[in-house]
Amino acid sequence: MAGHSKWATTKHKKAAIDAKRGKLFAKLIKNIEVAARNGGPDPDGNPTLFDAIQKAKKNSVPADNITRAVKRGGGLDGSGVNYETIMYEGYADGGVALLIECLTDNRNRATSEVRVAVTRNGGSMADPGSVTYNFNRKGVIIVNAAETDEESILLATMDAGAEEVKDEGEKFEIICEATDLVAVRTALVDAGIDYDSAEASFVPGLEVSLDAETAQKVFTLIDALEDCDDVQNVYSNADVSDEVLAELDA
């Protein structure tokens, strides 16, 4: 679930890594291709591509795969790519709002896959605009908590535009305006702090607290969506406490 690293951490501990990794690699490569197409193949002049490559590297995508993706996206190998972004809206159990971002070359396939994943897992599709009002476009930077501390992050980034630093256990999540994303992650690097990812994301305004039973249903639905080839990110306003996560782990 993009933007909710506590659940991401839990999933990574429990997941069957090989199957998930293949799908993750495909999504990261698609990010690189689209970034190179939209802003050019030079990461030094295309911060979105720079961050897409950084995230791919942090997730162990092979360098050759990254290079080929940049060339495809930038049209340097003569093939090019043509993906469109589609946003779907829906609800999961407990009234949890879902914002589902797809990158696809086949709108009909994407629509069908998303609808099936939602309805088969206890959710429902929503009309356009009924969910998006509760989400704001923000910059989100993820930092490994083992490598630094909250105070150091705050000192490095507040003047650059960081609005909030969330302690998510194994990760820190830095929130800023999307327009300040490059400035904040540059400030981190200048302070000698490494980061795992930096990207524009959708952050919920009003969150819904979940008990263990409801959280499990919501996570199952989100997993089903993330298994769809065309789904790039799933954002939700689910708020799952450490206690509930511990209960699910048990």
Image (cartoon, rainbow, N blue to C red):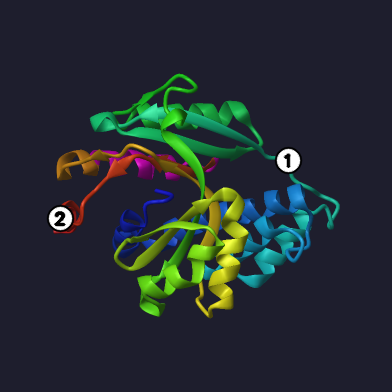
Reply yes or no: does residue 229 show up in magenta: yes
Asked if residue 103 is positioned above or below residue 33 in the image, the reply reads above
- 210 displayed left or right of 134: left
Residue at left offset 73%, top offset 59%: 70
Give residue 148's position: percent from left, percent from top. Answer: 40, 77
Give residue 199's position: percent from left, percent from top. Answer: 55, 54
Residue at left offset 61%, top offset 29%: 107
- Residue type indicated by callout 2: Glu
Asked if residue 209 is positioned above or below residue 181 in the image, the reply reads above
Residue at left offset 37%, top offset 45%: 223
The number of numbered badges drawn on the structure is 2
Give residue 53's position: percent from left, percent from top. Answer: 63, 64
| Residue 243 disc label | 2
- 200 displayed left or right of 89: right
Residue 247: quarter of image: bottom left
Can residue 138 be spotted in the picture? yes
Which structural element holds mark 1?
loop
Give yes or no for contact between labels 2 and 1 (Cβ–Cβ under 8 Å).
Answer: no
Residue nearer the viewer, 109 or 37: 37
Asked if residue 154 is positioned above or below residue 23 in the image, the reply reads below
Which one is in front in this view, the residue at disc 2 or the one at disc 1?
Answer: 2
Q: Which stretch appears magenta?
A: 217-230
- 85 displayed left or right of 188: right
Reply yes or no: does residue 70 show up in magenta: no
Give residue 116's position: percent from left, percent from top. Answer: 41, 28
Residue nearer the viewer, 28 or 89: 89
Mainly helix, strand or loop, the magenta region?
Answer: helix
Asked if residue 33 is positioned above or below residue 111 in the image, the reply reads below
Which structural element holds mark 2?
helix
Can residue 227 be spotted in the picture? no
Residue nearer the viewer, 238 or 100: 238
The residue that disc 1 covers is 82
